[in-house]
Image (cartoon, coloured by chain):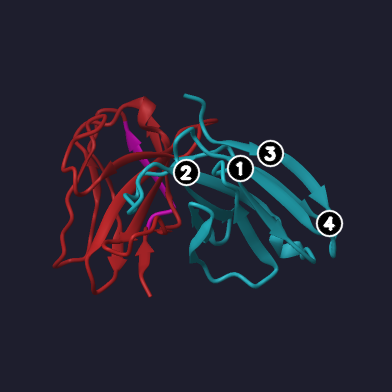
Chain colours: A red, B cyan
Amino acid sequence: AQRVTQPEKLLSVFKGAPVELKCNYSYSGSPELFWYVQYSRQRLQLLLRHISRESIKGFTADLNKGETSFHLKKPFAQEEDSAMYYCALRLANFGNEKLTFGTGTRLTIIP
Amino acid sequence: KAGVTQTPRYLIKTRGQQVTLSCSPISGHRSVSWYQQTPGQGLQFLFEYFSETQRNKGNFPGRFSGRQFSNSRSEMNVSTLELGDSALYLCASSSTSGGSGELFFGEGSRLTVL
């Protein structure tokens, strides 16, 4: 069965410093990887997905199939980045919307 | 467009009772998924419905069931409630028929079992 691991439950970073939230997955087939974010008092929402290869709010993530990782990175943290971040995996070509989520990392940006 | 709407937002039940939660997806979305969120287990997939058919099911006991109506609204039911069923139940909808991973979540229904 597929599994998503986010090793850090809590991460604190100073404003302006680089951010990296780690995500590792286990699945032998073709996965699709996503980052979802939940800001305070807001709904869980999609931040980015690996197939679009775009930068959202300054965040990027590269799928590394060799290391089975999908780490989220931002070069300069901003206070509004404080939130709960979830990495998620979907099995491609299965024709459904089942996502397997990691347990999440709470990111706090220190002013 | 209105977002995903879940009702009720909060409810308290006692062990042994049953509960029904409702989810109205974004207009035009035909896929509805349900997740259970707890501090210990995080977000766990319950089931997904598409065009009134259950397309996938997670590893939950048979006490957890769901259905989808022709207008894409969905309900989930938990029978014979246990203390461990206390959780935030999230509903999410999606517009793509083949699946895309882009889910739009509701605010959730927080269930407390006493």
The span picked out in magenta is A7-14
The residue carrying mark 4 is B114
Percent of width and height locating residue B101: 34, 50
Does B62 sit left or right of A36 as displayed? right
Disc 3 and disc 2 on one polypeptide chain: yes
In this rendering, position of residue B63 left or right of residue A101: right
Q: Quadrant of residue B19?
A: bottom right
- State the predominant SS element of the stretch in magenta: strand
Chain that bears disc 2: B
Separation of marks 3 and 1 at Cα, in angstroms: 7 Å
The residue positioned 35% from the left and 52% from the top of the image is: A87
Q: Residues within 10 Å of mark 4 (few under 14, many from 20)?
A: some
Q: Earlier in the sequence, mark 3 or mark 1?
A: 3
Dot 1 falls on a residue whose secondary structure is: strand
Find disc 1 in the rendering and name its residue.
B23
Same chain for the residues under marks 3 and 1 in the image:
yes
The chain holding disc 4 is: B
Picture layout, residue B81 above or below residue A72: below
Q: Are marks 1 and 2 in contact (CB under 8 Å)?
A: yes
Q: Report in which chain the residue with disc 1 lies.
A: B
Label 4 and label 3: CA atoms lie apart by: 20 Å
Coordinates of residue A105 in the picture (x, y in percent): 41, 49
Looking at the image, tell me whether mark 2 or mark 4 is earlier in sequence order.
2
Query: Which SS class for mark 4?
Result: loop
